[in-house]
Image (cartoon, helix red, strand yellow):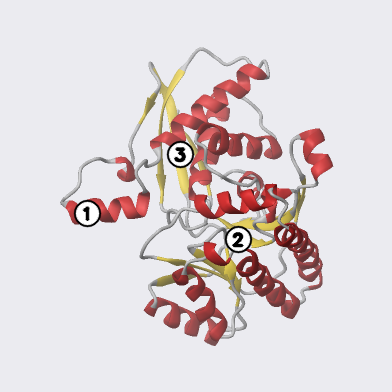
Amino acid sequence: MIITNTAYPRAALIGNPSDGYFGKTIAFVFRNYRASVQLYETPQINFLSSPRDLNEYADLTDLDNKISLYGYYGGIRLLKAAARKFFIFCRDNSIGLEKKNFTIRYDSDIPNRLGLAGSSAIITAAVRSMADFYHVGLQPEILANLVLAVERDELSIPAGLQDRVAQAYNHPVYMDFNREHMEKFGYGIYEKLDIPDGINFFVAYRTDLAEGSEILHSRLRDDYNAKVPEVLAAMEEWAELTVRMREALQKKDLSQISTLIDRNFDLRCEVCPGGISSKNRRMVEIARNAGASAKFTGSGGAIVGTFENEAMFERLRKDLKVFGVEIVKPDIVTSGAAE
């Protein structure tokens, strides 16, 4: 029997990057792209390569393009780290595993290294598949923590929790990473949200050169640990923006939603002026010039925002395409269960 699990890209609607600093965020996942993992029993454990893991290139131009898009390491390391961390989690929690092995492979069309949580989607689908294979039950908050541990502990990827929480719940989630609650339980206070009809969201992403978020996260962490006043104040404001966004969604206050999205990005510019490339900033400027609201979905490479009508969306599509940016209307996942 082949076990298949799917996870989706994440768009941080508001509050990021405060999720790694005891803040508050709202995020959702959307079906326009996906990462799928297949797993089946075999005599030995085996990790199969996907196209982004291949080591043969047509020429140096092809090599340069593939490394720019996928980095140097591909996705096999994600599967290996997920398998090791899953085993350690089960061992440390006295969860007995059946004596059987598996072959695992993945496939993903989530645009890579663009702030859409493509890596954590692969890991989430992999952990779900191993949990199904070994009949291990994982609550969403535990699954999210486990996926974060794979990235942060095994792979040394700086990251916050919100990506994994949204992917674990498969639903828009309001997340309060209250310090006291986090230190007591190891996870935040999570609340599923309903996004009302009539709010027009878009997600747009660059197609030229992917960028990782490691440098920006590292600089922000250093400033936070050094208690730089502006950074501490920004974390508090991002959390407050999230509270106000939850209220605006409940009231279907479209004007307020747009204002909050714009402020989230402007605040990032104030405290991380050197961490935002001109190309990433330009995406937001183009969207706003068309009358839309816009902010990063993560730490750059993709944006999320609202638009008023089809005429505005078509202008967004046209203006962004000239700059090498694709745009989609996100099909927001609200199933609440793995698919």
Mark 2 Cα shell of 10 Å, populated few (<14), some (14-19), many (≥20): some
Q: Secondary structure at mark 2?
A: loop
To which residue does mark 2 refer?
332
Q: Residue at x 38, y 16 (%)?
A: 43
- Which quadrant would residue 202 be assigned to in this image? bottom right
Q: Position of residue 203 (x, y in %)?
A: 53, 67
Q: Earlier in the sequence, mark 2 or mark 3?
A: 3
Q: Residue at x 66, y 32 (%)?
A: 138
Rendered image: mark on residue 329: none
Q: CA distance from mark 2 to mark 3?
A: 21 Å
Rendered image: mark on residue 37: 3
In this rendering, which labeled residue sits more in front, label 2 or label 1? Answer: 1
311 in relation to 9, above or below: below
Q: Position of residue 94 (x, y in %)?
A: 67, 15
Looking at the image, can residue 2 be seen? no
Please name whichever residue, 139 or 291, is drawn nearer the observer in this view of the structure: 291
Rendered image: mark on residue 62: 1
241 in relation to 106, above or below: below
Looking at the image, can residue 61 be seen? yes
Q: Amino acid at mark 2?
A: Ile
Kindly indicate whether the residue at mark 1 contacts the one at mark 3 (C-beta within 8 angstroms): no
Q: Earlier in the sequence, mark 2 or mark 1?
A: 1
User: Which residue, as the protein is rendered here, is positioned at the far top?
Assistant: 99
Q: Position of residue 292 (x, y in %)?
A: 59, 80
User: Which residue, as the protein is rendered here, is positioned at the far left?
Assistant: 59
Q: CA distance from mark 3 to mark 1?
A: 26 Å
